[in-house]
Image (tube, grey):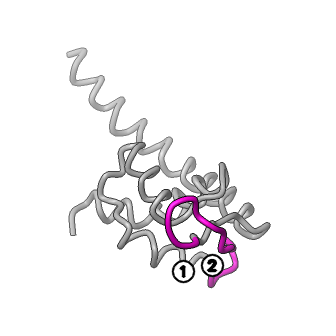
Amino acid sequence: MSLRSQLLKGILDGCVLAVIEKELVYGYELSRKLQQVGLSDVSEGTIYPVLLRLQKNGLIRGVMKPSESGPNRKYYSLTTAGEEALKVISEEWKQVSVPINALLWKGEDLHESE
């Protein structure tokens, strides 16, 4: 498994919750939205197990709704617990990403100025 895949696996729940926080989405649409922001390795096959786990853990809820084209779709929204989890994940990500970015990018700037 590549480093990128390992990093993404660690933060994917937070990414999924962040998309769902903005709007009701169904699985395929969620996968597309993640791909549109640059997470091209996130396929439907990756998303559905995450959605099932988040729903089982009470962080999201799914509601079947009619589709304009085809069968009914399950649309997901955050629960109160999901909103809280997203806040925690966001804060923890910030606590990790800010110093890592400072190390990686400032270190690169030092080499460029020499």
Residue 9 horizontal side relative to residue 4, left or right: right
* In the image, farthest residue toward the top: 113
What range of the chain is rendered magenta?
56-72
Query: Which of the two residues, 24 or 38, is positioned nearer the viewer here?
Result: 24
Question: What's the residue at 30%, 23% (across, down)?
Answer: 109
Three-letter amino acid code of the residue under disc 1: Leu
| Local secondary structure at mark 1 | helix
**Where is residue 30 drawn, in percent x and y?**
49, 58
- Are the residues at dot 2 and dot 1 in contact (C-beta closer than 8 Å)? yes
Above or below, 104 against 14 in this view is above
Q: Quadrant of the N terminus?
A: bottom left
Q: Crowdedness of circle 2 by 10 Å Cα count: few (<14), some, many (20+)?
A: some
In the rendered image, residue 63 lying in the magenta stretch gets the answer: yes
Asked if the magenta segment contains residue 81, the reply would be: no
* Residue 42 x/y as whole percent: 35, 60
Judge whether 94 appears above or below 64 on screen. above
Kind of element beneath mark 2: helix
Nearer to the camera, 77 or 66: 66
Q: Write down the quadrant of residue 2 in the picture.
A: bottom left
Q: CA distance from mark 2 to mark 1?
A: 5 Å
Residue at which label 1 appears:
52
Total marks shown come to: 2
Amino acid found under the numbered disc labelled 2: Gln
Residue at point 39% right, 66% down? 9
- Outermost residue on the bottom side: it is 56
Question: Which residue in the protein does label 2 denote?
Answer: 55
Q: Quadrant of the C terminus?
A: top left
In percent of width and height, residue 48 lies at 46, 74
Horizontal relation, residue 11 to residue 76: left or right = left
Image coords of residue 113 (percent x, y) = 25, 15
